[in-house]
Image (cartoon, coloured by chain):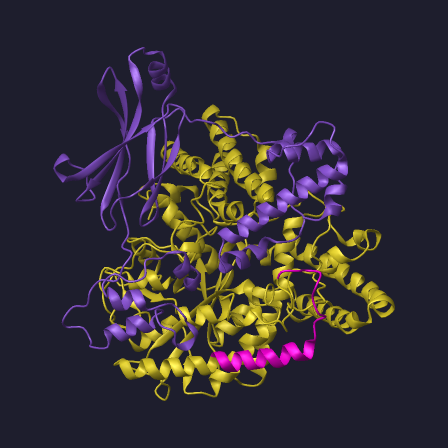
Amino acid sequence: MSDRFNDKKGLISMVLHAHLPFVRHPEYESFLEESWLFEALSETYLPLLRVFRSLEKDSVPFKMVLSISPTLASMIKDEFLQNRYISHLEKLIDLSEKELVYTKENEPESYKLAVMYRDLFIQNLKDFTEVYERNLIKEFVHFQKKGNLELITTTATHAFLPCFREYPEMIKAQILSAVESHDRIFGVMPDGMWLPECGYFPGLEEYLKPFGLRYFIASSHGVLYADERPEYGVYGPISCPNGVAVFGRDKASSRAVWSTEDGYPGNDLYRDFYRDIGFDRPRDYIDPYTNAGNRVNTGFKYYSITDKSDLGNKDFYKIEEAEKQVVLDAADFVQKRIEQVETLSSLMDRKPIVICPYDAELFGHWWFEGPRFIEEVFRGIAKSEIATASPIDYLDIYPHNQKATPAFSSWGDKGYGQVWIDGSNDWIYRHLHKLIDRMMELVERYPDESGLKERALNQAAREVLLSQASDWPFIMKTGTTVPYAVKRVKTHIHNFNFIYESLCRNVVKTEWLTKLEKHNNLFPGINYRMFGKDYL
Amino acid sequence: MTKERLQSLSYKSLLEIAERDHLAYDEGIEKEVLISLVLDSLEEERRDREKLNNLAVRIEATKYNVSLDEEFDFSSAEEINLPERYNETKIMLMLREPTWGFVYWDLKFDVMKILNTDSDFEGLFLRMIELSDRIYSKEDILDFFDIPVNISDRRRYIRFPNEDTFYMIELYSMVKGNEKLICRSNIIETSRNYILPARDSETSNGDELIRLSGYSSEFGAAVPVASYIKIPQRILPLNAEAVEEEN
């Protein structure tokens, strides 16, 4: 057994899951929901890459697992969305120039912040167009090749798999499309799978192993409630009967970031997410930067959290104070992990591994100082007796682990499927399940089509996958942009049914199909036959 | 939602929202009063939603948060109508959590027609069956109970009496006092909601490691350990309090 962490007492695995649903609307001049991607690029992905470069420059050793969903990776690579992102940044830079004048005259407390935002947007544009030449994927791959990142995948469109456990062909199709997409985009097969929302049900591992996927991460109670009591709790993996390893989420480090009471991002000094000049500035001033006249978030946020209950009663954000606080918080996080590992290693006959998984967009988008926190955590850990590592690193040291099957679980509210099966969204499953039945029927009827029919069948398969994104029922449950989520699910169901009926009548409208292919253009290598019973 | 956004909507659109949200208002209500009414209702709705969702869900929701203004969809002309039924007789049982499931069902058009026109038809009911195995046989039935449903019903949430066992649902019609099986669902296995007891051979530190795995107040996790100490084999069912901790 080789242990390159010989001098370390334990390992910390920072796992970020980056995902956004596929949103691409060339049929509109601008589209509000496309800003989900633009905001995440500006506030999370580009700042994270800057963190990696900064650590690289200072030769700080670090290792992080980054799960990038196939839908997000497809959008990052998409030329049309890249152009729109550049226009979005140019508009923000234009607004920032206006803000410099406005704040100098009317709100001097915000002037310095307006300068910061202008510089940030200019830097984002420069990084995106000149430094990375629009190719962020290449930069992620660079850090993977250097051994700093372990890039893993998730299901093709982020389907919450426990809702489809009666449909093995669909689960297989979601995983196959994801692995194929990951290989095509990142040039390497993934070793791990991020289960969307950590949604696991016993037996799911059987779908992972055939694709070379060696591990996944489960909620802590998923591991603790396994069919064998886990001997190391969540501080060592368990191994499913087929050998796929399961790493349990550590509750302490999760709570440090998520908790409303004592979580770091809730500190009054940090920047407030909700108050935005999009809602503060006069209508005629902000209108050119809004969407069809609707007030929207612009990204210019000048206030600190201060009063959590009243948007109108907040102090101005002070960059230097927030910077001091983030250094303190990162140091506290590292110190707690050191103490945790110290205690755990005295109880275990091997090194403990502490798994810290988070939504990537939490860092930067919601918690503005989050990327700096990550940087400081890596710098702190590098100087300590613990090390950052990936689950694969751990399996290299300890390939044999206790056999056990986790319990049904998720990391969602209340721990199971309550978010995705709810009175607000349960109507979708009748249709989504029917689509799978019909897709399987199509494969049986047309096992070996080519030309136009094959294109139609492949597009039908895309529509089935797109309809299954966990984002849509999530949004219906949480109440943000519900009409869009409903429309998206309905549109994919409708598109599929239209193709299904066209094929039944043996009439495929070429123009309509071509338009749809150009619109929903992800998974170029899709093969509709994957929905067949005997495929692979 | 901002007042400004509501002010930008037409009086007709505001009435439409009020109708949709079942708000009571007097005929001829003034636009400003109507705006206040709608604003209060939306704010109440938002607060209720926030109460229902934990912090992790609320933060994840910010990924999709582009505006304080709620999106309204008045585009009835563009409305996509999905098939209401697929002319199939089917029942599907889905596991939602260890003690609750969601079931949906449907009947073929001709089956519906027969039932609707049969003067001896007395009603439909669901039979929830607990099984000792994942494969159905009459010998494996441990227990069952019936739930009457209306002919227009097509979905329902059902509480499972036991964890860590198997369930299936059958849809029956009652005709002239006789039960008639219409269809049978898939079988699901309900989940464990507790930690299994230790085996003798396990490390003596196992209990401590389980406790440190999230049920202690050390290193920042502040979950009460009382229930673990009292009932070692059945710790912390994921109630609302524990759930907040989990995330």
Residue A236 can be seen in this image: no
Quarter placement of the N terminus of chain A: bottom left
Q: Position of residue B141 (x, y in %)?
A: 16, 38
Q: Is residue A330 part of the magenta span, yes or no?
A: yes
Seen in the picture, residue B112 relative to A97 is either above or below; the reply is above
Seen in the picture, residue A325 relative to B125 is either above or below; the reply is below
| A114 and A507: which is toward the camera | A114
Q: Position of residue A65 (x, y in %)?
A: 45, 69
State left or right for residue A77 relative to residue A434: right
| A222 and A438: which is toward the camera | A222
| A368 and A50: which is toward the camera | A368
Q: Is residue A311 part of the magenta span, yes or no?
A: yes
Query: Magenta span: helix, strand or loop, mainly?
Result: helix
The quadrant holding residue A238 is bottom left
Query: How many marks overall?
Result: 0
Q: Which chain is yellow?
A: A
Seen in the picture, residue A77 relative to B75 is either above or below; the reply is below
Q: Colour of chain B?
A: purple
Seen in the picture, residue B71 relative to A203 is either above or below; the reply is above
Residue B173 can be seen in this image: yes
Q: Position of residue B149 (x, y in %)?
A: 34, 28
State the extent of the magenta-drawn residues as a range: A309-333
